[in-house]
Each structure stands twice: as structure tokens, then as C-alpha cells.
Amino acid sequence: MKKIIPVAALAIALAAGAGVYLNTGVSAAPASTFVLLDGSKKTTDDLKGKVTLVNFWATSCVTCVGEMPKVIATYDKYKAQGYDTLAVAMSYDPPSYVVNFAETRKLPFKVAIDNTGAVAKAWGDVALTPTTYIVNKRGEIVKRYVGEPDFAELHKLIEKLLAEA
């Protein structure tokens, strides 16, 4: 018999800052266009060839702000090995706040603003932040976290995916 986690328990775990791994199986990352802070665009196809962490976040999300130094450290640790990070700010996040956050924290990776909410919708109706996806070199989602990931476990997964042909 499968055990079902009540929504309230999930909400309490997230409020406590506990990362919850949700098994999505391996599936192709949804076709999306990300509008970056500099006005340029990146598509899901651009993710292929690298292991990419796609992080849906908001400047008003305490857990998101708290995990950002670990997201930066992870990027710095693996970027030379074919790893990338794309931070996607939620549609309700004022663009000026996102720009200010990215500049003052010196975010070293690409930051997109999901003005319309279309990207969050395409990626599984993302509503809770942070929601983080790990995409392999073939452009497939291999893992999704709601809440802050266990970064030691995340690093092991990244290393495994980087080692794949």
C-alpha cells in the first residue's frame, strides 16, 4: 500500500526549510524560452550538452535567499566540468528586485525572469519556491526538489551526471 503524504505535512516540511525530493522519473525538459536579465533569450535546447540546475526562486522567499550561496558554490565547483545553472525568478517577483539581488550578490550564472508565468507553468505548474530541477546532458529532467536540496546528495548526482557520455 502506498503511503500518501498529506498536503499539510508537505507544507509544514517546506515551511521548516526541509527539501522534499519528488520523483519525476526521467523526462524531457519542457520546451521553454527563458528571458535573461540582459534581455537575451535561452531555450530548453540550449541546456543540452551540459548538466544544468534550473532553480525557480523569488527574492521574497527566505529559503531561496538562504540557499543561494550554496547554489553559487555548486556552480563555481562544477562549471569548468560542463555544469551550468539557470535561476528563474517567479512572475510575481518585481524585476527591479531580481536585478538588484543578482547584482548585489554577484550571481555568476544566468538569471531569467518569468514575467508571464509561462515557464513555471510549463515546468509542472511550479508554485512553491525554491523548486529545483536537475537536467542531464541530453536535456532530460532527472530530479526535482521542492525546498532546499541536500547539497551533499546533489553534488553526488551532479558528479554522476557529469561522468556520463
Image (cartoon, rainbow, N blue to C red):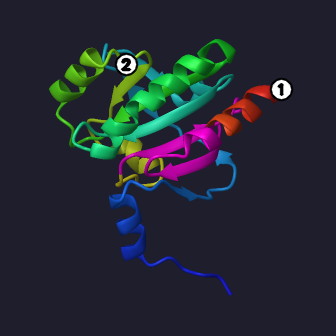
Q: Quadrant of residue 100?
A: top left
Q: Position of residue 153 (x, y in %)?
A: 64, 43
Q: Nearer the viewer, residue 46 or 67?
A: 67
Q: Is residue 51 visible?
A: yes
Q: Is residue 155 shown in magenta?
A: no
Q: Nearer the viewer, residue 141 or 150?
A: 150
Q: Earlier in the sequence, mark 1 or mark 2?
A: 2
Q: Residue furthest bottom?
A: 1
Left or right: where does residue 32 sit relative to residue 48? left
Q: Nearer the viewer, residue 43 or 16?
A: 16
**Helix, strand or loop at mark 1:** loop
3D distance between C-alphas at marks 1 and 2:
29 Å
| Number of numbered labels in the structure image | 2
Residue at numbered disc 2: 107
Q: Residue at x 60, y 81 (%)?
A: 3
What amino acid does circle 2 point to?
Answer: Leu
Quadrant showing the C terminus = top right
Q: Position of residue 126 (x, y in %)?
A: 40, 52
Residue at numbered disc 1: 165
Left or right: where does residue 74 sit relative to residue 142? left
Q: Quadrant of residue 57?
A: top left
Q: Quadrant of residue 58?
A: top left
Q: Position of residue 152 (x, y in %)?
A: 61, 39
**Helix, strand or loop at mark 2:** loop
Q: Residue at x 55, y 46 (%)?
A: 150
What amino acid does circle 1 point to?
Answer: Ala
Measured along the vertical axis of the image, is residue 86 above or below residue 7?
A: above
Q: Residue at x 48, y 53 (%)?
A: 19
**Circle 1 residues within 10 Å: few <14, some 14–19, many ≥20:** few
Quadrant showing the N terminus = bottom right
Q: Is residue 135 shown in magenta?
A: yes
The boundaries of the magenta stretch are: 129-154
